[in-house]
């Protein structure tokens, strides 16, 4: 006797992201090389120094005020910008605190910190330390007409905090997929048209994810195995397992189609798993490089000759969480 069953899966997607604007912590130091950071200004020395800003400073002073740690950080005076220092020239310049000047007539040039629109920057000048701020950029001799230096040169410190603008995207190509009619004599693979396929050659649907948050992200899976009333098709568990025709099985495997997102064990092989006993499972991790990762989700089902008739369904939830 031929046994056949019609089975559909419905998948729901939700996104979890902590309600915070922190996309990293600003960190600045004086150095002679800044390969992975942003140069805010340069100095002729680490003490009793003159300052330089773009465009002239790139070919002159060797001491760099280098900052890192915040997404989209820039030394340009655009976006969400705060002026660090006002300068008499773009090079060989004396410096002033912007708030200490009645006007900027003698200080027409600026050293700035900026982040993309949606972020924020705050600057302060404090005696002895930068308590309450993320970092110390340097120090200055006086509020106006000042020489500058590194963090240890003078009692008055140049302090800053910044938060970057976050981006997070998460989408699913199709939230209703199905196996069509199942036979106990062959495996069946879910497809977006809900008719199913007899070969594992295409994704059932895809997840697309990206973020610029420095800690990257993870995607987790929650839900149930295929169910019809009190009857179920056995989840394939937490160990990658091969298809076994004639045995009740429901499983998932994940293909990394593009980007830096990768599936984690046991979903990252050519075999199948579905570990409902430990749900929610972390199934994908990715970096915060802003690139979009496309993950191909593939589902398999087998039934036995004794599997009860019925319409079997499973509701699955995928949750993307960014890591701070």
Image: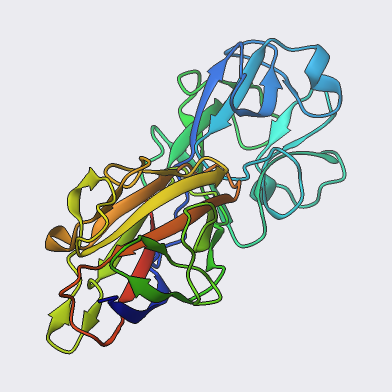
Q: Nearer the viewer, residue 203 or 263?
A: 203
Q: Residue at x 48, y 76 (%)?
A: 175
Q: Where on the picture, by quarter, is residue 130?
A: top left
Can you say whether 210 is above or below 5 in the image? Answer: above
Compared to 311, does 284 lie above or below?
Answer: above
Q: Position of residue 161 (x, y in %)?
A: 49, 46
Q: 200 or 39, which is in the foreground? A: 200
Q: Position of residue 80 (x, y in %)?
A: 67, 56
x and y percentages locating residue 204 in the rendered image = 49, 63
Q: Is residue 232 visible?
A: yes
Looking at the image, residue 67 sits to the left or right of residue 276; the answer is: right
Q: Which quadrant holds residue 41? A: top right
Left or right: 59 with respect to 143? right
Judged from this view, the residue extending furthest toward the front is 1
Task: Look at 64% across and 19% down and name the residue there.
Answer: 64
Residue 264 placement, left or right of 224: right
Q: Is residue 23 left or right of residue 104?
A: left
Residue 29, percent from left and from top: 51, 24
Q: Quadrant of residue 56?
A: top right
**Residue located at (39% from left, 34% from top):** 129
- Identify the residue at horizontal 77%, vertical 28% (top origin): 53
The N terminus, quarter of image: bottom left
């Amino acid at each position: 006797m031929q046994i056949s069953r019609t089975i559909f899966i419905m998948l729901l997607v939700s996104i979890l992201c902590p309600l915070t604007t922190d996309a990293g912590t600003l960190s600045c130091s004086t150095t002679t090389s800044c390969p992975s950071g942003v140069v805010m200004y340069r100095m002729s020395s680490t003490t009793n120094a003159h300052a330089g800003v773009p465009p002239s400073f790139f070919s002159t002073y060797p001491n760099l005020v280098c900052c890192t740690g915040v997404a989209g950080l820039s030394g340009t005076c655009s976006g969400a910008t705060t002026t660090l220092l006002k300068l008499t020239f773009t090079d060989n310049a004396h410096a002033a605190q912007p708030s200490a000047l009645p006007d900027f007539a003698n200080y027409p040039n600026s050293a700035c910190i900026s982040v993309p629109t949606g972020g924020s920057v705050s600057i302060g000048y404090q005696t002895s330390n930068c308590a309450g701020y993320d970092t110390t950029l340097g120090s200055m001799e006086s509020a106006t007409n000042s020489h500058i230096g590194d963090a240890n040169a003078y009692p008055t410190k140049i302090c800053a905090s910044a938060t970057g603008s976050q981006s997070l995207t998460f989408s699913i190509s199709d939230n209703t997929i199905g196996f069509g009619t199942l036979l106990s004599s062959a495996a069946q693979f879910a497809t977006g048209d809900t008719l199913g396929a007899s070969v594992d050659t295409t994704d059932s649907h895809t997840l697309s994810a990206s973020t610029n948050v420095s800690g990257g992200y993870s995607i987790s899976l929650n839900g149930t195995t295929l169910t019809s009333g009190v009857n179920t098709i056995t989840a394939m568990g937490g160990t990658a397992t091969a298809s076994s025709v004639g045995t009740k099985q429901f499983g998932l495997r994940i293909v990394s189609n593009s980007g830096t997102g990768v599936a984690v064990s046991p979903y990252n092989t050519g075999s199948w798993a579905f570990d409902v006993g430990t749900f929610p499972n972390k199934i994908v991790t990715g970096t915060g490089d802003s690139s979009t990762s496309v993950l191909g989700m593939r589902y398999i089902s087998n039934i036995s000759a004794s599997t009860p008739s019925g319409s079997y369904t499973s509701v699955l939830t995928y949750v993307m969480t960014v890591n701070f």
